[in-house]
Image (cartoon, rainbow, N blue to C red):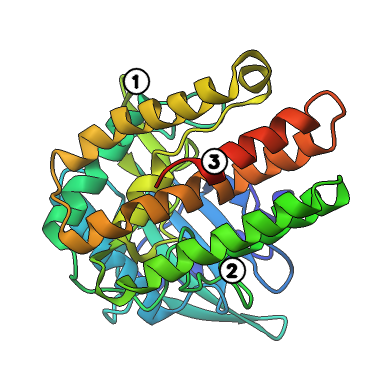
Amino acid sequence: MNANDEKTILELDEIREILSHFGLPVQSITGFFDTSHDENDKRLNFILDDKYVLKVNSTTSMWEMRLQEIRRLIHRYRAIGVYCPDFIPALNGSLSYTLTKDNREYACFVEEYAIYPVLGWGTEHDRKEVIEHLGVLAAKYTGVDLSETKSMWSIIDLAPLDVDVDEKQENANMLTETLRKNGFGDLAVQVDQFNKMLREKIMAVFHDLPRCVYQGDLNSTNELHKDGHFVGLIDFNMAGTDVNINVFLNETNWFPEDEEFDAMSIQEIISKQDSEQNEELSVILKHYALNDDEKYAWPYYKRIADLFQYPNVCLMAEWLKSDARRKKCAELIQALIGKPL
């Protein structure tokens, strides 16, 4: 297959030239996928001979020091038994080769082709199998080689895609705006005040909370499986440092889908939100012991995740626009605010 068949920017001969800097021969392109965000953030992935993956990224999204940082993290995951394909260094010892094409610079790097298949959309592992490693990782590597790059779950700290405010604050703003537009101005004020209070409580210990570096993007397109069981991860582009309890609470958060929302009472929803989360948290916390600062901050981080995680806010925004669901949604929000911390 020629790279141009997929409207990529590279011919096979150009790919062979790049791979020569890594000491790797190439016969053919056996797969290609494009995860680019836009023309200024290209992310091209070439599967070569079903042995290697050449990744060609705009230098704004990936660079040598970031690759070195990610590789150290990959080695930590492998050390706790989570398989992750490693990067293959260039002959000069670096992890990247800079390509200049059409007046743009790209970081080219090579990853092993995963020995296990990706699970893919539409299928899910047992969630507890996937998240158990978070407790193992945090227990062994808290405070180790922390990255300046923050996780996408970050509160107060800004992740790479955040602008001015963290994502949870952006989500809170979206929820309060939707409340106001749908006749719940007083509730919007309560939500805003509640969010500010939660953050003020967190700030009392924020800088002392234990942190670790995480892969940061657990979903079925990044999860590797063997015989239906979770065995590993790919795609560390979103990797970053985060507060441990924030990761635990976000990765175990439960929220009803439409049918569940319609069928369950408010109290049933809140009870299930806690019971589902506690069941999943048990596999994390059997490996990791909370300290006093974490115990103090736990309820505040939990309520922010419960109310302001992006999928949750998207669902509530739709329910607030629905004549049939609007009142019940407002009651759910009120109950989440009023629930004892």
- Kindly check if marks 3 and 1 are in contact, taking CB atoms under 8 A apart as contact: no
Quadrant of the rendering where the N terminus is positioned: top right
Query: In the rendered image, is residue 60 in sight?
Result: yes
Q: CA distance from mark 2 to mark 1?
A: 33 Å
Instruction: Look at the numbered disc 1 and give the secondary structure of its residue.
Output: loop
The residue carrying mark 1 is 228
- Image location (x, y in percent) of residue 208: 24, 74
Q: Earlier in the sequence, mark 2 or mark 3?
A: 2
Instruction: Look at the numbered disc 3 and give the secondary structure of its residue.
Output: helix
Q: Residue at x 53, y 72 (%)?
A: 160
Q: Residue at x 47, y 66 (%)?
A: 199
Instruction: Look at the numbered disc 2 and give the secondary structure of its residue.
Output: loop
Q: CA distance from mark 3 to mark 1?
A: 36 Å
Q: Residue at x 32, y 53 (%)?
A: 298
Disc 2 marks a residue whose amino acid type is Leu
The residue carrying mark 2 is 161
Q: Earlier in the sequence, mark 2 or mark 1?
A: 2
Q: Residues within 10 Å of mark 3 (few under 14, many from 20)?
A: some
Query: In the rendered image, is residue 155 in sight?
Result: no
The foreground one among 73 and 280 is 280
Disc 1 marks a residue whose amino acid type is Gly
Q: Earlier in the sequence, mark 3 or mark 1?
A: 1
- Image location (x, y in percent) of residue 290: 17, 53
The residue carrying mark 3 is 336
Q: Residue at x 34, y 73 (%)?
A: 204
Label for residue 102? Answer: none
The foreground one among 49 and 281 is 281
The foreground one among 148 and 72 is 148
Q: Is residue 198 above or below residue 314?
A: below
Disc 3 vs disc 1: which is toward the camera?
Answer: 3
Taking the image as shown, residue 114 lies to the left or right of residue 273, namely left
